[in-house]
Image: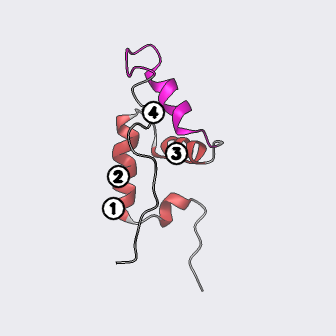
Amino acid sequence: MEERHTNPLEAMDPETLRRLERRAAKHARSVEDEAVAILTTAVEPFESANTWFEERLAGTGGFAEDEFSIPPRTGSPARWADFSR
């Protein structure tokens, strides 16, 4: 019969638990609180990459708004790629 744990952290492999302990210490939390924070973040609604960057760069003097825009196409018209060779 498979061993069942009431605390999922008890079933974690030792290396993963050590990494979780280091991460918890870095954030000044208990291992359990760190696990809850990770799981809470993992199940948050998806946010677009643009929203993520905008929130983190707001007020930081980060990237110019047009720095990541695609420049208009100039020169020859678009053509299909030829993979027949």
Classify mark 1: residues with Cα within 10 Å, few (<14), some (14-19) or many (20+). few
Q: Earlier in the sequence, mark 2 or mark 3?
A: 2
Question: Is residue 64 highlighted in magenta?
Answer: yes
The percent coordinates of residue 16 (x first, y second) are: 38, 59
From the image, state whether disc 1 or disc 4 is nearer to you: 4
Residue 61 in the magenta stretch? The answer is yes
Q: CA distance from mark 2 to mark 3?
A: 13 Å
Residue in the image at 43% along x and 38% along y:
73
Separation (CA) of disc 1 from disc 2: 6 Å
User: Marks 1 and 4, Cα distance to the nearest angstrom?
Assistant: 50 Å
In what quadrant of the picture does the C terminus appear?
Answer: bottom left
Asked if the residue at tag 1 contacts the one at tag 3, i.e. Cβ–Cβ closer than 8 Å, the answer is no
Where is mark 4, residue-wise? Answer: 72
Q: Is residue 33 left or right of residue 60?
A: right
Mark 4: amino acid: Pro
Count of picture labels = 4
Q: CA distance from mark 3 to mark 4?
A: 41 Å
**Horizontal and vertical percent position of residue 43:** 63, 47
Dividing the image into 4 quarters, which one contains the N terminus?
Answer: bottom right
Secondary structure state at the residue bearing disc 2? helix
Mark 1 and mark 2 in contact? Answer it, CB < 8 Å: yes
Badge 1 amino acid: Glu
The residue depicted at 36 percent of the width and 63 percent of the height is 14
Which residue range is magenta in the image? 46-65
* Closer to us: 31 or 59: 59
Res. 65 image quadrant: top left
The kind of residue tagged 2 is: Arg
Residue 15, disc: 1
Q: Are marks 3 and 4 in contact (CB under 8 Å)?
A: no
Residue ID for mark 3: 38
Which residue was labeled with disc 2? Answer: 19
